[in-house]
Image: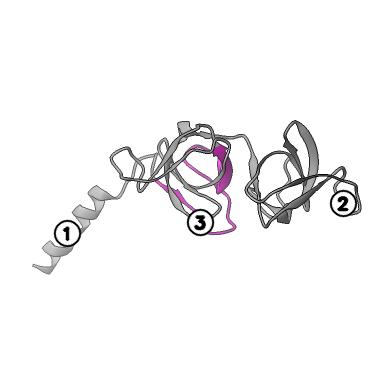
Amino acid sequence: MIRRFFFSCFLILATTVPISQGRAQMIDAGERLPGASGLPLPRFVSLASGEANMRTGPGEQYPILWTYVRRTLPLEITAEYGNWRRVRDKDGTQGWMHSALLSGARTALVTGGTRSLYGKPRPASTEIMRAESGVIVSLDRCLPQWCRVSLAGRTAWINRTAIWGTYRDEVIE
């Protein structure tokens, strides 16, 4: 009787846990392993669409959690399941989006109030513009402490601690 119960539980689990090549790939914090797409997890991307639904699960049958309407918003991919990506936004909200709604273009969100952008990657450099918290910038290049960004047709350097959308010490060429 007990064996039959455990065997039944095993059959139920075996039919509900995805075992195909497209199974969800999840990682521990700090670890960057390839996902089902062959690209590293976690990784940052941006919204390719002006309107994108975040769902509770990897499929259109799952309820919509949020609808994002801000094209180029940076998001972090934390898992993959077939053509679906589990993403996290700056506020920590997580859900699933279809990969067609995402772009590999790197962007970042200015955080923590009004931030200075400089002509060179050092604070003693000339401030050439300022950006308010919530402004999205395009990432052109990142050194360990500074990122060169594009904003309103201009290029400048910003301290990495003033943006969300990169990993600490990540180098972007």
Q: Which of pointers 3 and 1 lies earlier in the amino acid sequence?
A: 1
Please, is residue 95 above or below residue 71 in the view?
Answer: below
- Disc 1 is placed on an element classified as helix
User: What is the x, y in percent for residue 115?
Assistant: 75, 52
Q: Which of pointers 2 and 1 lies earlier in the amino acid sequence?
A: 1
User: What is the x, y in percent for residue 153?
Assistant: 75, 31
- Disc 2 is placed on an element classified as loop
Q: Residue 67 versus residue 3: which sits nearer the camera?
A: 67
Residue at the extreme left: 1
Q: Residue at x 65, y 44 (%)?
A: 135
Please identify the quadrant where the N terminus is shown: bottom left
Residue bearing the label numbered 2: 122
Q: Nearer the viewer, mark 3 or mark 1?
A: 3
Q: Residue 68 versus residue 29: which sits nearer the camera?
A: 68
Residue type pointed to by label 2: Arg
| Residue 111 occupies quadrant | bottom right
Residue bearing the label numbered 3: 92
Please give the range of residues in magenta. Answer: 24-46
What's the mark number on residue 80? none
State how far apart marks 3 and 2 are (Cα): 30 Å
Residue type pointed to by label 1: Phe
Q: Residue at x 90, y 47 (%)?
A: 126
What's the mark number on residue 7? 1
- Disc 3 is placed on an element classified as loop
State how far apart marks 3 and 1 are (Cα): 39 Å
Give the number of marks: 3
* Residue 33 located within the stretch drawn in magenta: yes
